[in-house]
Image: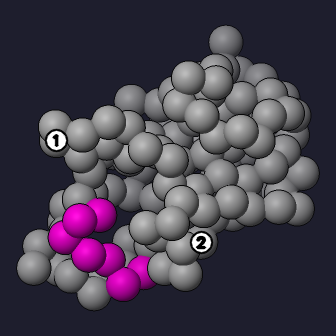
Amino acid sequence: QVQLVESGGGSVQAGGSLTLSCAFSGGIFDIYSMGWFRQAPGKEREFVAGIGWSGGRTYYGAPVKGRFTISRDNAKKTMLLQMNSLKPEDTAVYYCAAVQYSTTWDVNDMRYWGKGTLVTVSS
């Protein structure tokens, strides 16, 4: 059974940076496309960033493009999200998610989810 565990959340002031990490276990990491999603209070869960199973292609949601960078290390079975120039509107619970071979990045298509890590950005 695939398990995903996020870490690295916390509180930061606007303009600051944080790096989130997702640890993958219980499966073959190389066949899973990995993504980050977030959910702010009272809002629907939204796509933040994704990376294909080979790591050769990355995808970003419009609100974070140019500020966030997603990466993966298949040898270590981890995925990172480097978040720069953080804004108060980035405040949310960030979730790691995985799906085999797909790159649609639809919330309903992701097969496995972590429990989330809270990011709070103050102005």
Instruction: Give the residue furthest to the front.
Output: 62
The residue at 64%/40% (across/down) is 105
**Tag 2: residue type?**
Thr
In this view of the protein, which residue sits in the foreground, 24 or 81?
Answer: 81
The residue at 76%/42% (across/down) is 103
Which contiguous range is marked in magenta? 84-90
In this view of the protein, which residue sits in the foreground, 96 or 27?
Answer: 96
The residue at 29%/84% (across/down) is 16
Q: How far apart are marks 2 and 1 (CA)?
A: 24 Å
Q: How many residues crowd around disc 2 within 10 Å: few (fewer than 14), some, or many (20 or more)?
A: some
SS for dot 1:
loop
In the image, 53: left or right of 104? right
Disc on the earlier residue, 2 or 1: 1
Q: Classify the position of the C terminus by image quarter.
A: bottom left
Q: For residue 13, which quarter of the picture?
A: bottom left
Q: Check residue 69 in the rendering and tell me which mark sits there, or answer none.
A: 2
Q: For residue 72, which quarter of the picture?
A: bottom right
Where residue 115 appears, x then y in whole percent? 39, 30
What is the number of callouts on the image?
2
Q: Classify the position of the N terminus by image quarter.
A: top right
Q: Check residue 41 in the rendering and tell me which mark sits there, or answer none.
A: 1
**Tag 1: residue type?**
Pro
Where residue 52 appears, x then y in whole percent? 80, 49
Instruction: Give the residue furthest to the left.
Output: 123
Where residue 8 appears, x then y in whole percent? 38, 57
